[in-house]
Amino acid sequence: MEHSALRRLRNVIISALSNPYNLIAISLIITLGYLIVYPIVDMTISTFRVAQGDLRRIPGSQVGDFTLFHWTRLFFSQVSSALLFTPLRNSIIVGASVTVLSIAFGFSMAWLMVRSDLPLKKIFWLLLLVPYMLPSWTIAMMWMTIFRTGYMGGPPGFLAWLGFSLPDWVAYGKLPIIIVLSTSNFAFSYLLVSGAFLSVNSEMEEMASIMGASRLRIMRKVTFPLVLPALLSAAILTFSRALGAFSTPALLGMRVDYHTISTMLYFSIRIRDHNAGFAITLILIFIVSIAVYMHQKLLGVRRGYAAHGGKGKSAALVPLNKWKYPILVLLIVFMAFAVIFPLAILLLDTVMLIPGRYELSNFTLHYWIGEFGTAAIFRGMEGVLRNPWFWDSLRTTMILTLVVSTIGMVSGQLIGYITSRGRGRLTGEILNHMAFLPYMIPSITLGALYLSMWAQPRLLMPSLYGTFALLVLICVVDNLPFSSRAGTSNMMTIGYELEEAASIAGASFFRRFRRIVLPLARPGFLTGFILIFISVIRDLDLIILLMSPGTTTLSYMVFTFSNSGYDVHANVLSAIVFFIVFAAFIIAGKVGKVDLTAGYGSATDGGGER
């Protein structure tokens, strides 16, 4: 009887392992466990061990010994305030402020664009996406070009050239960091919330209107609860992005010693105080995890509202009446000063021979195509398009974005297939949660994790530090929450009945997947591709700790130029990045009919995940 039980168990195991679905699911779980869970565990252990650089700080210790030195130094030493508490306070203030501003404006714009009879919607829609297409460090460069004072030396900003005397705190520090990050993130909130508005069934609102409820009451009691899941997702996503943002605080804060926890993490890693940096990384992950947990609890409480918000007929547009044109004028002024004017000044700055002198006689294309040593302009630096480093960085950037977008798109659709077909199965649930984990890890923190993991050989794998493969790996992992959710949403539109019919007809799993699933899922591929493409080409925070001379990208080149005082060259690079992203967006919209609103709406399906 015992042999019979063992035989049945063996048959069950063999049957499970011979099922292609199970093989793919298990392979993905092992891969994600190695790429996401293992680095967190390994980093945690390293903060309790003595490293080579710690021997002089911990007398009598040996490499590998257990120690609490890094944690006690972080929380209970004389440097705790400078190393942790002050940067952490700054980060929380910045994160909370950016979240409130981004959500308030994103929600307002989503309602106006989807539910009101606001004129010129197509123009506003394009202008709203410009901050999304611009990396936050590009918006920071715009800010400095306009508001730069003489505090840091160098040429004056545009307003200073006009004769305005501005305090230094307008150009650098907390206020500009909050404004720049809010400008960068409100478009993100708009995309998420507008997708929710588009999916809300209007019948409940119409019933409330028939019963005599005012528009304000309908908004408060019906519409707002229905879009609350997307609003909560936008809030937690914005908070985690702002909390872990590096490039904007680095460009606008480090110059005046205003540190956030992300810039302190970067500083610790750069001075080779790795274990202190890793401890800060874990603290950042812990804070974001608490925020995500609170988000999920709140979402669970309100899930009943969302259950009634299935797709139905589109809601009737709410007339703005006497407020239509005042709101229109206000938005035109806002867009002019928040989007058009800064972008125009950034471009204008790139063709001014003497920075800060905006005159026609000062026009030049030197910073674009000038030769090396011309008139000793900017210490003889040649124009960006003549700089060999630019072409190397451009090539690396484009190859990286194309490779990551392709791998991320395919892996996201594959994970989406397993999770959509595996609802109720343990493997599907495990894979769904594992693909969500990078959402809880700010970009620079994920960079620190991979620095810890791949700086030396691990588990039969060689050291990947400084290689192109490491950049591909981390970019794919960082985009998994988006690509997998978009993939799940795409696969949910494909009925399982077609696969069942093919299975009955004798088609193998791989034949069904190749002849049925892939052709039907093709329309969603391009959306996933363009979302990842834009994300990778904009990202600096993720890869800043992993850069090496042979793998630099355009974003890192901008950061290096700006820190070295070549601000105009950095502006030229920022403009080039914007043109690349804008061209990709236009091509995807014209050729592939990509709808970014739908893409980000799918990314929050099923509980508000990233």
Image (cartoon, rainbow, N blue to C red):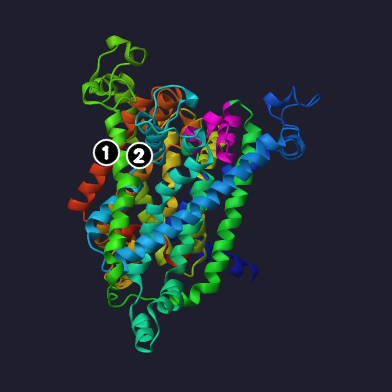
Residue 518 visible, this orientation? no
Which region is colored magenta? 249-270
Left or right: where 258 falls relative to 483:
right
Residue placed under numbered mark 1 in the picture:
580
| Residue found at the very far left of the displayed protein | 591
Quadrant hosting residue 407 = top left
Left or right: where 39 falls relative to 322:
right
Q: Quadrant of the N terminus?
A: bottom right
Where residue 126 sits in the image (x, y, percent)?
Answer: 26, 52
Q: Residues within 10 Å of mark 2 (few under 14, many from 20)?
A: many
Q: Is residue 260 magenta?
A: yes
Q: Which mark is residue 537?
A: 2
Residue sitting nearer the eye, 483 or 269: 269
Where residue 210 sits in the image (x, y, percent)?
Answer: 34, 88
Q: Quadrant of the C terminus?
A: bottom left
Left or right: where 262 falls relative to 528:
right
